[in-house]
Image: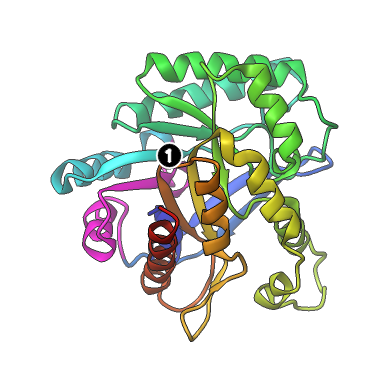
């Protein structure tokens, strides 16, 4: 279970990404603080019956030196829960300015060291901004070089570097496979997110960048009308390379049905390619009780995993 699934109870979050024009776009969400990140490991173990969890670096609002990271470490130790992965969204490795990119790499190294010291098996970075435009089928050499350096650094810290299909060119399976091949499996692995493909990501991005005064759109209804065939095709293409999988859900309805991805179908595809690694729930829906809705996604994923074992 990812702490991001219950973000609406874990306090305000802020993060920034580079938009398609190269400008920095900042986002903030004033979520209520009903549970601390330090309490999340034990709460997740009790609520979900999990022995491993994930977290997201930007949920620690004080940055690398946030005392809540120490509280989180104490929560891990006290509960016996293991840290599987940390998603780190700092920087933009597609940045063409050498000095800016070098600074981003150094910042990522500091984050990697911080969470590797907590025993995180994996650390995930972005292969560029999720809002970057597509760049053809071949990743640029400067991105490959940066990821090779970070992969070596993560290994030295006792962790394994992953990249995720997470918007922009990374949501193109062909581009991602080229990137993995260019960096090499000894330095870089894949976190496959079942929902982060263009068919779903582009409508979400369009909502985020909608001009002020635009007509209000129900994101649940919007995603229900999306043709998901390219999503399942993307899972087919990336599944053989996956080392970790995010089980993505955007909505749980009143009947308990999970939307929009058919998790039974998606997990069946994973199993058909021999995937037997970790499955982490990342619930992105809003409203209601995120603990209950995340638990429902987890139950559906567990049932599917058992059916396709």
Picture quadrant of residue 71? top left
Question: Disc 1 marks which residue?
Answer: 86
Picture quadrant of residue 84? top left
Residue 60 visible in this rendered orientation of the protein: no
Q: Is residue 171 above or below residue 226?
A: above
Judged left or right of residue 7, residue 36 is: left
Q: x, y (%) of residue 139? A: 76, 25
Q: Quadrant of the N terminus?
A: bottom left
Q: x, y (%) of residue 135? A: 83, 32
Judged left or right of residue 74, residue 231 is: right
Q: Is residue 73 above or below residue 34?
A: above
Q: Is residue 111 above or below residue 129?
A: above
Q: How many marks?
A: 1
Q: Is residue 162 above or below residue 26?
A: above
Q: Magenta residues?
A: 35-63
Q: x, y (%) of residue 169? A: 75, 38
Q: Residues within 10 Å of mark 1 (few under 14, many from 20)?
A: many
Residue 133 visible in this rendered orientation of the protein: yes
């Amino acid at each position: 279970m990812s702490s991001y699934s219950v973000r609406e109870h874990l306090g305000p979050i802020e993060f920034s990404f580079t938009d398609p024009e190269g400008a920095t776009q900042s986002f903030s969400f004033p979520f209520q603080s009903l549970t601390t990140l330090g309490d999340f490991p034990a709460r997740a173990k009790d609520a979900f019956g999990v022995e491993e969890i994930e977290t997201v670096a930007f949920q620690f609002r004080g940055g690398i030196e946030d005392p809540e990271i120490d509280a989180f470490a104490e929560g891990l130790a006290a509960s016996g829960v293991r840290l599987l992965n940390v998603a780190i969204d700092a920087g933009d490795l597609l940045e063409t300015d050498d000095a800016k990119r070098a600074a981003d790499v150094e910042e990522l190294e500091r984050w990697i060291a911080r969470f590797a010291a907590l025993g995180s098996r994996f650390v995930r970075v972005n292969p560029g901004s999720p809002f970057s435009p597509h760049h053809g089928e071949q990743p640029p050499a400067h991105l490959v070089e940066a990821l090779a350096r970070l992969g070596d650094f993560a290994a030295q810290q006792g962790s394994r570097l992953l990249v995720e299909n997470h918007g922009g060119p990374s949501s193109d399976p062909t581009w991602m496979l080229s990137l993995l091949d260019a960096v090499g499996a000894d330095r870089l692995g894949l976190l496959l997110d079942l929902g982060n493909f263009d068919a779903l990501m582009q409508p979400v991005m369009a909502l985020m960048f909608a001009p002020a005064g635009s007509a209000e759109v129900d994101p649940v209804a919007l995603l229900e009308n999306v043709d998901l065939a390219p999503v399942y095709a993307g899972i087919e293409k990336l599944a053989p390379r996956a080392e970790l999988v995010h089980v993505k859900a955007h909505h749980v309805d009143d009947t308990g049905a999970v939307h929009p991805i058919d998790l039974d179908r998606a997990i069946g595809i994973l199993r058909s390619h021999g995937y037997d690694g970790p499955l982490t729930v990342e619930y992105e829906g809003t409203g209601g009780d995120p603990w209950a809705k995340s638990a429902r996604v987890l139950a559906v994923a567990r049932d599917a995993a058992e059916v396709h074992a």
